[in-house]
Image (cartoon, helix red, strand yellow):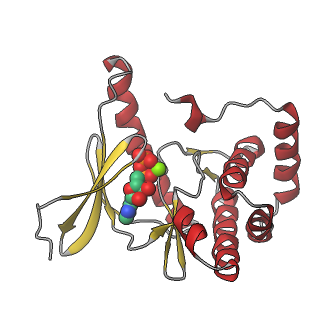
Amino acid sequence: MLMEGMAKFLARGAEAELYTDRFINRRVATKNRVIKRYRIKEIDVPLRRSRTRSEASLLHSAKEASVACPPVYEIDEFSLKLGFIDGVLLRDFIKHRKGKDISRVVREAGRGLARLHRLGVVHGDFTTANVMVDGRKVFFIDFGLGSFSKDAEEQAIDVLLMKKSLGSEKTYRSFLSGYGKYEKYGEVMRQLAEIEKRGRYVVRSWAGA
Ligand SMILES: Nc1ncnc2c1ncn2[C@@H]1O[C@H](COP(=O)(O)OP(=O)(O)O)[C@@H](O)[C@H]1O
Ligand SMILES: [Mg+2]
């Protein structure tokens, strides 16, 4: 068993390093936003600070929208102590599981996104690498690029990123059968078609800021 204060390396994401640890007798994932030397310091420091704070705040709102996501136990300047999700990335789940399990989980992810959008939260980096599956439960993680917005175009970008990362048309349809619960579904899909027609778009997570 891991003792408090004995952190173990867990994963390295695009902007953070994750460690598991014990905290008040629970397993936690500490997400440290690490220095990015390709950014000048005057940008890097405030950016890491503001993403850390906004991620905590968006996770809180996601919970209020009944979207399963890790609890936030502690907020530091550049790091968050999050509840540990004992699961696999949706990306790996899709690789290794049967079609029926995949459609069920992906539909649940669609329902979750509908709840999130209804409450005015946009995820900002909604891919199969930022959704985790723990048994039957679907957790949303990594809200660092998210924002508070009810803008249909921003919502459409969440759907577009998931569409691209799901890969198959069939899986995407299962996802939409869940997301279709959203009242503004039609409007978001029109925006999505518009974005795809333009063929050129800038997605925050690709900008590499
Ligand atoms: N709460 C958590 N519980 C367990 N694993 C996590 C948790 N949060 C993140 N991870 C793992 O760490 C990886 C990177 O975390 P993420 O928040 O996506 O960081 P980044 O912003 O750098 O992409 C995830 O893909 C996942 O494997
Ligand atoms: Mg991530």
Q: Is residue 111 above or below residue 32?
A: below
Residue at the image position 65 percent from the left and 45 percent from the top: 149
Residue 15 percent across, percent down from the top left: 39, 40
Q: Work out whether residue 165 or residue 107 is closer to the camera in this orientation and state it.
A: 165
Residue 171 percent across, percent down from the top left: 74, 67
Q: Is residue 66 visible?
A: no
Q: Is residue 198 left or right of residue 136?
A: right
Q: Quadrant of residue 6?
A: bottom left
Q: Is residue 116 above or below residue 148?
A: below
Residue at the image position 58 percent from the left and 67 percent from the top: 95
Residue at the image position 38 percent from the left and 21 percent from the top: 39
Q: Is residue 56 left or right of residue 5?
A: right
Q: Is residue 34 above or below residue 22?
A: above
Residue 191 percent across, percent down from the top left: 84, 44
Q: Is residue 135 left or right of residue 97?
A: left
Residue 94 percent across, percent down from the top left: 60, 68
Q: Is residue 172 visible?
A: yes
